[in-house]
Image (cartoon, rainbow, N blue to C red):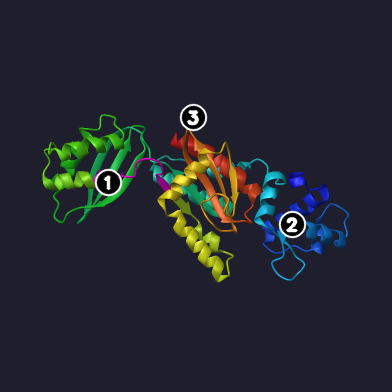
Amino acid sequence: MPGGLDPRSAAILREIVEQYVETGEPVGSRTLSRRLPLALSPATIRNVMADLTDAGLLFAPHTSAGRLPTDLGLRLFVDGLLQFGELSDDDREAVTHALAASGRSLEDTLAEASTMLSGLSSAAGLVLAPKSDTALKHIEFVPLGPGRALVVLVSADGQVENRVIETPTGLPPSALQEAGNYLNARLSGRPIAELRRIVAEEMATDRTQLDALSTQIVAAGLATWSGEGRGGSLIVRGQGKLLSDVTEIERLSTIQALFERLETHDTMIRLLDLAESSDGVRIFIGAESGLFGTSGVAMVVAPARNAANRIVGAIGVIGPTRINYGRIIPVVDYTARVIGRLLG
């Protein structure tokens, strides 16, 4: 038994956590006596619950006799008492269909993955794709109207990324064409970081042979991919589900702080660190991940690995600690493998 619990205590803790995941309400001894497969009286169950409370695995949120699991109790449940099975055929089909990338950019596909994770888990879905060092095939600047242009970047493996940039007032289309021709002449299968270095050197020595406006467009286009190194795009969908059953003002401020934390660059780096230290799915309860200094929140995360077993991203969900771990773990695991093949 996990944590040195005897079978009776383990059964009671498991039932309390499962009831908590289902209802979010404190669980009392009478409810347990009706649901447990063991023939135990309410008095015996109360004694066991008191012992589990003394051990820091349960707590009483009010003066009632009901108990809820602490973060430590949830950790013990996840590590040794959780039962989960294979992903259903319907869920596998939903994941595969959602991530079919035909006709879509990589960013759109990853956003769909995050939305799909949120829907299947009833929590917020996370998809982290690191900045790619894939060789480039083509760059193009497309005018969108006064003051705006679209930068289209095509990698050697056919992936497409788009960014919108601001352009000087009155910019002629020829300047966009000249900027694109200049960059494409220097691509030669180079990754974006190397292309940026070459262009910077030529600009520093005035060897670009571009006019001032075209030079400005080149710099703006390259700047849209300026986040070199680790941490690329973190896509979060379904944040509103974290607020679905929050009523206390303190919890609202905690969730707001969580949203703000998700938007920081070091969160992406930390997520990748967590993925790299994981062979498979990992579950973080409360402040365990080091990302969020709060209780009441759980994160399930898995690395996405390519065919060479190199980590190319991270997949996960964030939700209240009463998320359905048994359902979410296989969903995250399977989605991470599909995303790994996609990014790889």
Residue, disc 3: 307
Residue at left offset 74%, top offset 45%: 2
Spot occupied by residue 270 in the image (x, y as percentages of width and height):
47, 46
What's the residue type where badge 2 is placed?
Ile
Q: SS at mark 2?
A: helix
Are the residues tagged 3 and 1 within 8 Å (C-beta)? no
**Which numbered disc flags the more N-terminal residue, 2 or 3?**
2
Q: Which mark is residue 16?
A: 2
What is the chief secondary structure element of the magenta stretch?
loop
Residue, disc 1: 223
Q: Closest to the observer: 304 or 43?
A: 43
Mark nearer the viewer, 2 or 3: 2
The residues bearing labels 1 and 2 have C-alpha atoms spaced at a distance of 53 Å
The image quadrant of residue 344 is: top left
What's the residue type where badge 1 is placed?
Ala
Answer left or right for 168 relative to 65.
Answer: left
In magenta stretch: residue 152: no
Segment colored magenta? 221-234
* Residue 254 in view of the camera: yes
In magenta stretch: residue 225: yes
Answer left or right for 86 relative to 47.
Answer: left
> Is the residue 89 above or below the residue 143 in the image?
above
The image quadrant of residue 123 is: bottom right
Residue at left offset 42%, top offset 53%: 264
What's the residue type where badge 3 is placed?
Ala
Residue at left offset 13%, top offset 49%: 172
**Which numbered disc flags the more N-terminal residue, 1 or 2?**
2
